[in-house]
Amino acid sequence: MSLLKYLPVYVVDALVIMHANFIYGDLSKFGIHRPKIGPFTQKAITGRSPVIDVGTIKKIQGGEIQIVPEISSIKKDKVVFNDGTERKFDTIVFATGYRSSANHWLKDYKYALNDEGMPKNSFPCHWKGENGLYCAGLSKRGLYGIAMDAQAIANDVEKVLSARK
């Protein structure tokens, strides 16, 4: 980001992408595809912050975290994928990218999301839906907002689990 004080955005984007390619290599084999525009151009156009890796890529590359195919349906704890495979999960985390598309695939989304796929509840209670649905990163407050959402969700999950004991 310091380079943006001295160089045009397109140059900084090119340097950052070159560095990311050197550090991480081609991530498409894991189902991760780089956006067509650079991270700082994307920030300038959309207001959305680029992703900052804090160890997730290493866990994906090592097989500790798996990227799964597109979801066809969810029935309680069983997920059916478009390729026909089925798996059971205790927890499901949807990483939908830079804009919410949840209203296109989440059945009965209207109890938690508006027609743009954003939370119906207003800030600061936007992160909590009904039926155990949480919305992280949809506050339009950048990385700080995502961190706030994640902490609020973790605290609520802990409260729910403690109440079950």
Image (tube, helix red, strand yellow):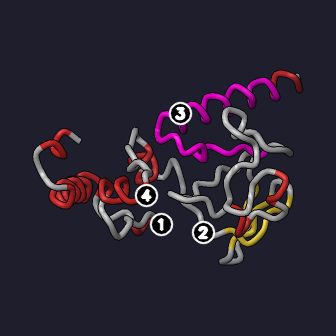
Q: Is residue 60 left or right of residue 68?
A: left
The earlier-in-sequence mark between 1 and 2 is 1
**Would you say residue 24 sits in the magenta stretch?**
no
Q: Which residue is mark 3?
A: 147
Q: Which residues are magenta?
A: 133-160
Q: CA distance from mark 1 to mark 3?
A: 24 Å
Whether the residues at callouts 1 and 2 have beta carbons within 8 Å, the answer is yes
Q: Which residue is located at x 47 percent, y 66 percent?
A: 31
Disc 4 residue crowd, few under 14, some 14–19, many 20+, Cα 10 Å: few
Q: Is residue 3 left or right of residue 37?
A: left
The earlier-in-sequence mark between 1 and 3 is 1
Res 31 label: 1
Q: CA distance from mark 2 to mark 4?
A: 27 Å
Residue 48 in the image, given as x and y percentages of width and height: 44, 51
Q: Which residue is located at x 67 percent, y 53 percent?
A: 118
Q: Which residue is mark 4?
A: 46
- In the rendered image, which quarter is residue 150 located in? top right
Does residue 13 show up?
yes
Look at the numbered disc 3 and give the secondary structure of its residue.
Answer: helix
